[in-house]
Amino acid sequence: MRYVAQEVLNRLQQSGPNGDRIVAAIITALCKGAPPAHQEAREAIERLKRQHVEDRQERDAQAAREREEREQKERERDAIAQRRAEQKAGQRDGLMRQFEQMVGQTDRQARGFALERLLNDLFDHEDLAPRGSFRITGEQIDGSFAWGNQTHLLEARWRDAPVAGDGFATLDYKTSGKTVDTRGLFISINGYSKEALQGLAKKGELRFVCLDGAHLMRCLQPGGSLRKTLEEVWRHAGETGEAFLPASSMRR
């Protein structure tokens, strides 16, 4: 019985001010009608009351300390998130400056290498595990990145004219010679000819999608995201069989 009474008291103490009032009422009721208590009994009751108050104060103080610790951790997490957001924004601004500097490049080869560096930095900025250009037997790969649990091979071009129909042959060959999960991303700053895109749509299964300079500008602007761009373009490809979705037609 003693343990039952102790459990009841513990639960009442944990229920806040209402529990305190119930405990006080129980003590008062138990004392009613009782013969005058000895001094020791009265002192024991007073000690019980004081202990109850002290326990309540200690629990309240502990709860306040825990609440303050939680709030402090939340403030620290918010501060870290804010610093990271500011850092990311600064990095994206830097990428935009890189792009603007490339526009003024007149040397085509230098501009092509600069584009590869920019894209590699953009992939890294968006945590896409990039790998710079590399060579395997018989092939030169402009780079690769990982997204959607798949490897994506990169073909990047910055030429004066839009990509013509035969321009897709290289990336088509590179992606078809790899695993089933290997995809590709073709980026041509000056876009693609209408005939090239129509011909690509007739080839059947798409192994890569196409972006142009407008997509890249969109990704580099505040709030832009290459991940979201790829998601929408690949969904469009899956629904329509078209590898290219103009930036002006995108929802996001």
Image (cartoon, rainbow, N blue to C red):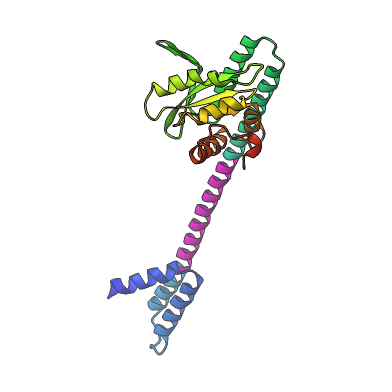
Q: Identify which residue, 235 or 144, lies in the foreground.
A: 235
Q: In front here: 80 or 23?
A: 80
**Residue furthest right in the image:** 104
Give the mark count: 0
Q: Main secondary structure of the magenta part?
A: helix
Residue 79's place in the image compared with 39, above or below, is above
Task: Answer left or right for 54 relative to 38.
Answer: right
Quadrant position of residue 158:
top right
Q: Residue at x 45, y 77 (%)?
A: 22
Q: Is residue 38 left or right of residue 103?
A: left
Viewer-proximal residue among 42 and 29: 29
- Magenta stretch contains residue 69: yes
The structure residue drawn at horizontal position 51% and vertical position 22%, both measured from the top left corner, is: 154
Q: Position of residue 34 (x, y in %)?
A: 38, 88
For the N terminus, the image quarter is: bottom left
- Report the residue at 69% width, 13% height from top: 105
Q: Is residue 200 above or below residue 173?
A: below
Q: Is residue 167 magenta?
A: no
Q: Please give the range of residues in magenta.
A: 52-79
